[in-house]
Amino acid sequence: MSDTSSNSTDERIKEISSFRQALIRPELGGIVGTIAVFAFFLLFAFDSGMFNSQGVMNWSIVSAQFMIIAVGACLLMIAGEFDLSVGSMIGFAGMIIAILGVTLGYPMWLAIIITFALCVAIGALNGFIVIRTGLPSFIVTLAFLFILRGFTIFLPQTIERKTIIGGIREAAEGDPLASVFGGKIFGNVFNWMGDAGIIATFQRGTRAGDPVVDGIPMLIVWAILLVIFGHVLLTKTKFGNWIFASGGDPEAARNSGVPVNKVKMLMFMFTAFCACVFATCQVMEFGSAGADRGLLKEFEAIIAVVIGGALLTGGYGSVLGAALGALIFGVVQQGLFFAGVESSLFRVFLGVILLAAVILNTYIRRMITGER
Amino acid sequence: MNTRSTHAPIIQMQNIEKHFGAVIALAGVSIDVYPGECHCLLGDNGAGKSTFIKTMSGVHTPTKGEIIFDGQPMNFNDPRDAMEAGIATVHQHLAMIPLMSVSRNFFMGNEPVKKIAGLSFFDKDLADRVTMEEMRKMGINLRGPDQAVGTLSGGERQTVAISRAVYFGAKVLILDEPTSALGVRQTSNVLATIDKVRKQGVAVVFITHNVRHALAVGDRFTVLNRGQTLGTAQRGQITPEELQDMMAGGQELATLEGSLGGTV
Ligand SMILES: Nc1ncnc2c1ncn2[C@@H]1O[C@H](COP(=O)(O)OP(=O)(O)O)[C@@H](O)[C@H]1O
Ligand SMILES: [Mg+2]
């Protein structure tokens, strides 16, 4: 690279310093934000318990939740579309699992598989309507935000006369697929760390001697796997190039033979899949499904993606950036709690950081395209 | 150019008609294009130039008429069919994605893959290497393969799109008004690129409404007016003024027919 730029002296291309060039990347905001947030809480909340094993697990779980839906939202946004029905989809998916697995008594693995199939099909329907009508996905998925939420309240009320269905943990006992979402891994490592005194153990009660944190929840495993999958798909495969192209300029992409509709459709389905992963992990953890689960999650996912450097107009962004955006979210939300700050201030933080990120992204976009 | 007597035409469009409901956009247009020639398609706005080349590239199916490609009657059902046959189109505005790198744009829709552990991945090294090489051939010096297309000038973007089409084996290259939004220097770069491509044996269909641009590189000239062709002229058989008059509506058609030498 360096030799080509030295022997090519095109006077129209201004030399850009390598430092400035290193800055032109979608993850910039996410990296800076992550460093700032950790520096802040290490300085001001180090003794609050935020950085012992429980505290770390606490904000890791919250961050992982954000990450799971941010990966889907990120790829979809880069492909040029939005999905505002993610939050409702989370509530809906959890409720369907509960109705099938508890009320109707299906084996939990079957309930989970049916729910995934249903949610991905609804994602495909979202995509189909957007592609066929040419309407903005904003409007189409806003409709599904209400439709799915409505069903999520209507179904349990009609069937069980309540809006929360419990008993999922009991119904999932010993189910192999349920443990893929609700289980924990590396229990042995945590036991060993507890015995070795590296992490805290229970001092009293029936579990005395056991580590307080006794494994990595599958939720976190899912988050890491989805981030790796999304990142590799986007940057290292042919399909990833199609995602960028479909969002960057669908007409140009079509003219070059990119199957734009298929790409968008698959991304709507993937977003629904991510929402369903979130929902399944959540109902396994809580042991119940509630009609109000997932409220506002679609916006939190979109904000994480924007902090991660994606452009709202599509065609540009990064899954790693979105994952950092989700990490920032989790750390700040839980950090404010540990630091004893009024939790409503989290919303103020959200708004401010969203604005800052969008302004930064616009600036980066201008640097890339050379527009003024 | 004497290629015409020695080669067969790569594509023949015979009496192409295209109706959009009540609108007759093309009322029987015929042209043929030979390998290695630059065939200019001239005409005022709304003459039907874009519609015509869209039937050639598989975007529209003609209402009537026949397309013979490489000696075979062809029915393109969508642009991919035409592309696979070797007909590439470079659209004026919709060719490149500014936010994507030159190398990603170059291989958009034709990404090279390599297998790692049974999975196929985008071969970025190959893509970067080929892009740098092809761009150098066309006289564009990139900062690097990751340079975004948005930083290129309009003429350079056209050149990237043209060399991409040629690299992927286009036998017929259709350029829809590639110069109409460009400045003088960028226009001459694009015209030079067209000349290079033609010399490689590619048949170029060059659409423009600028007579000077057409005369700079064209071997033959066909003028479209209100969905009809006013004839095809060879280089040297027609003056810029005559071409201009034909485009303006063929008021001087009677006097022109003589000078066209029976090629109508
Ligand atoms: N898809 C379409 N539907 C209806 N009319 C069309 C369509 N495409 C082109 N036309 C009409 O066909 C005529 C020729 O248009 P076009 O081929 O774009 O002209 P040019 O490219 O020469 O400026 C115009 O009158 C235009 O309105
Ligand atoms: Mg046109």
Image (cartoon, helix red, strand yellow):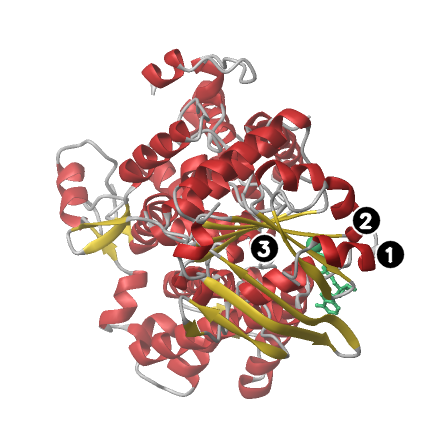
Regarding residue A308, the answer to whether it shows in the image is no
Q: Position of residue B93 (x, y in %)?
A: 63, 46
**Amino acid on which the number 3 mark rests in the picture:** Glu
Q: Which residue is drawn at the image coordinates 76% and 79% (left, top)?
A: B21
Q: Position of residue B45 (x, y in %)?
A: 78, 53
Q: Position of residue A201 (x, y in %)?
A: 23, 40
Q: Give the quadrant of the C terminus of chain B.
A: bottom right
* Residue at the right extreme, as displayed: B251
Q: Position of residue B260 (x, y in %)?
A: 68, 55
User: Which chain is disc 3 placed on?
Assistant: A
Q: Residues within 10 Å of mark 1 (few under 14, many from 20)?
A: few
**Amino acid on which the number 1 mark rests in the picture:** Gln
Residue A251, numbered circle: 3
Name above or below for residue A364 compared with residue A289.
above
Residues behind callouts 1 and 2 on a single chain: yes
In the rendered image, which quarter is residue A86 located in? bottom right
Image position of A241 (left or right of B29): left
Say which residue label 2 marks. B245
Q: Are marks 3 and 1 in contact (CB under 8 Å)?
A: no
Q: Give how far apart the Cα atoms at labels 2 and 3 are.
A: 35 Å
